[in-house]
Amino acid sequence: MTSDRIQKYMIRFYIGMFFLYLFGPLILMGITAFNTPKFPTAIPIEELTLEWFSVLANDKEMIAGIQNSLLIGVGVIFLAVPIGLAAALLMSQVHKKVQPIYYTIVVSPLLTPGVILGISTLVFWDRLGVWMEADYDTIFYSGIFLTIVGQSTFISAYCMLIFLSRLQRFDRTQEEAALDLGATNVQVFWKILIPFLRPAIGSAAVLAFLTSFENYNTTLFTIQAESTLTTVLAGKVRLGTNPSLSALAVVIVCVTLLGAILHEVYRRKEMRKEKIAAEAAKRAADKADNAMAPV
């Protein structure tokens, strides 16, 4: 056996072990979701059952946590994405000597522990509520509102990085041409910049939602009397679990795969449209060149 063949086998072995390390726990958890033995037994499979999905659907605490997580995720999208977009646009407008300082300030929440962000958010809005003599049923003491604000402090920085990477490929001459032709700054923003940033806006929204959905450190301090999926799961793990958590994992994996498939279908559809448009433009250009060519 040659050294090249040994190297090839070792590479395949390493890749196989790597994917087993990544997907092994998910596979075992998926098996327990359909098996009758007590958690976490995956083998032997005594009988296939959907009992644990029914247990999950009837778990009011878990359902309430999922609903709050979805609500918070949507709220974070509407707050973090515009803030990230504004920060990215300002980054592209400030002087080059100021950009490193500005970048460090805006990205600093990513380097701050989530515990600090959660505590500081809670203390700040509590002091603000006391100063304004607000009642305890106002937004100053709402766990959902505080969680949205607390998570957005660092998720908006992720969104800004996505927008910055997209803006690096933006041709500023389009803005200058539109302004020279009489367009206002608002029209340039909505007619030229936003269509160009549409893929980045979608990516930032998905990233913001997923980051919010799985966040725990910041949420633990800001959610107060409410609960999210992560806080409910943490409590159940401490007190003991059952295969309904495996059923939840299967549902999340299936939803994620479905989203990835739909995104890939949409991406390929857009690529086909762009290809058709490019071919049509090329044919039109060739036709114009042929028409202008001397006989």
Image (cartoon, helix red, strand yellow):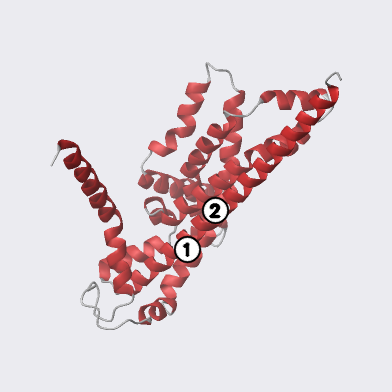
- Dot 2 falls on a residue whose secondary structure is helix
Is 76 in front, or is 133?
76
Image x and y of residue 162, in percent = 52, 38
Q: Amino acid at mark 1?
A: Val
Is 254 in front, or is 87?
254
Residue 5 occupies which quadrant of the picture? top left
* 123 left or right, relative to 159: left
Q: Across the whole image, how many numbered discs are drawn on residues?
A: 2
* 40 left or right, relative to 149: left
Image x and y of residue 151, in percent = 47, 48
**Is tag 1's residue or tag 2's residue first in the polypeptide sequence?**
1
Mark 1 packing: few (<14 Cα in 10 Å), some, or many (20+)?
few
Residue at which label 1 appears:
255
Q: Is residue 222 visible?
A: yes
Quadrant of the image containing the N terminus: top left
Image x and y of residue 218, in percent = 40, 50
Residue at which label 2 appears:
263
**Residue 235, placed above or below residue 14:** below
Residue at image point 55% right, 49% down: 205
- The residues bearing labels 1 and 2 have C-alpha atoms spaced at a distance of 12 Å
- Dot 1 falls on a residue whose secondary structure is helix
Is 13 in front, or is 263?
13
Quadrant of the image containing the C terminus: top right
Residue 91 occupies which quadrant of the picture? top right
Q: Amino acid at mark 2?
A: His
**Residue 3, placed above or below residue 150:** above
Residue at image point 50% right, 53% down: 209
**Residue 67, placed above or below residue 13:** below
Is 160 in front, or is 51?
51
